[in-house]
Amino acid sequence: MANLRDHMGRPIVAVTGIGVVTSLGVGKADNWAALTSGRSGIHPITRFPVDHLNTRISGMVDFLPSSSKGASHLTYELAETAAQEAVSEAGLESGDFGGPLFLASPPVELDWIDRFSLYNSDKQDAGAERLLRVARGLKELDVFETTQFGSIADRLADRFGTRGLPITLSTACASGATAIQLGVEAIRRGECDKALSIGADGSATAEALIRFSLLSALSTHNDIPEKASKPFSKDRDGFVLAEGSGALVLESLEGALARGAAILGIMRGCGEKADDFHRTRSKPDGSPAIAAVRAALADAGLGEDEIDYVNAHGTSTPENDKMEHLSLSTVFGERIGSMPISSNKSMIGHTLSAAGAVEAAFSLMTMRESVIPPTINYDNPDPAIVLDVVPNKKRNAEVGTVLSNSFGFGGQNTCLVMAREPV
């Protein structure tokens, strides 16, 4: 009989359902097959004109019905699709889930489709007064609802029958991991027996591309898109903007076993630490990231020698990869040179608000399948970053524990520790 309480006497939290959508495809099976074969989902942008842009590639999801309808509509469809896969795998009713919903999604703005609609409605005069007059004359709620930060979660709550007020959060690139952390903590506190945690982001718009370009954060390796994202390589030049979603059904181990659910993995620990150094840059000494990793290990009740694999944040930006290496080498010491590490972003790009959830899903699959996905494009290692990067091809390995890192703009750092089996 498995122990149902962790080292702190809290309910052990199990994962019973996983759902994924990325530029590699819809669902766990297609994504895992592509990921482990080293196939890239990065491709030229066709959704909008890119003639005068420095970056003309992305990991956009262009194959869903909502792909051309704007960020809010696409984010909802991404979240719904991943959640449906996760809830179905868990063997739960998709219209009567019964637990709380935690959604990580991008900050909401008026979609450009709606902006043009407002602009084209009345061209007799210009300025804010014209837009206000046109907006007041609209009789439908769609434009209003898609600009409300909580509207996507509200629709998902209705769709899946979650309980209580759905929580929407946006903690930059750590958002997906934070959504999982909130679900874990709610179960540990005894507030619920299960929770639905989702990270979704369909906001790879022209505006987002320009904003990140102005920050010099994006790769400009346009000629061969699949070669653009190269985490931990000496010639890395920025991340690739992408879209996707990841969803986990979290349950108390006791409740999951009682109803005969298959246990896909265990959420052992969560750690977070804020960084107030800069709006986009991490603190040079890496101390907040170091603290987040150590907090996750302490929460999991594990020592530095008990992590088998690191699913890196690994954005492919010069500064972030350097900082992540500093944090890992500080925590794990010389062992970091022989601990397998890889970055899913080398193939799917950076899915922003969804990244932490997508990478948690892949981490769980790594343990279940005993296969570590590669970091592709690792042909020119950075001599200043000494890591056991799994290069270009998958590696078969028994993995019992994983550390998954999410280090975001604005000083948001969240780390998750997962295990294949209960304590």
Image (tube, rainbow, N blue to C red):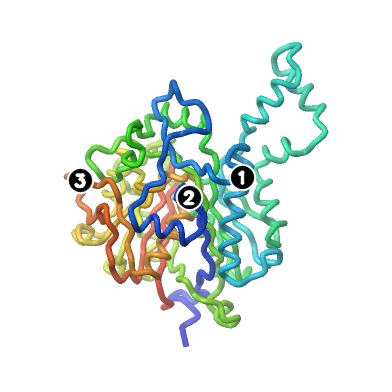
Amino acid of disc 3 = Pro
Q: CA distance from mark 3 to mark 2?
A: 26 Å
**Above or below 98: residue 347:** above
Q: Which residue is mark 1?
A: 65
Residue 165: horizontal and vertical position, in percent? 69, 56
Q: In the image, what residue occupies the spot 59% across and 59% down?
A: 83
The C terminus - image quarter: bottom left
Q: In the image, what residue type sits under mark 1?
A: Pro
- Where in the figure is residue 76, as x and y percent of width and height? 62, 48
- At 26% across and 52% down in the image, what residue appears? 392
Q: Secondary structure at mark 3?
A: loop
In this view, the mark in front (2 or 1): 1
User: Which quadrant of the structure image shows residue 328?
Assistant: bottom left
Three-letter code, disc 2: Thr
Q: CA distance from mark 3 to mark 1?
A: 40 Å
Pointer 3: what residue? 381
Residue at 64% x, 62% y is: 100
The secondary structure type at the circle numbered 1 is: loop
Query: Which callout, 3 or 2, points to the residue nearer the camera?
Result: 2
Q: Quick one: label 1, few (<14), some, or many (20+) residues within 10 Å?
A: few
**As drawn, which residue projects farthest toward the top?**
125
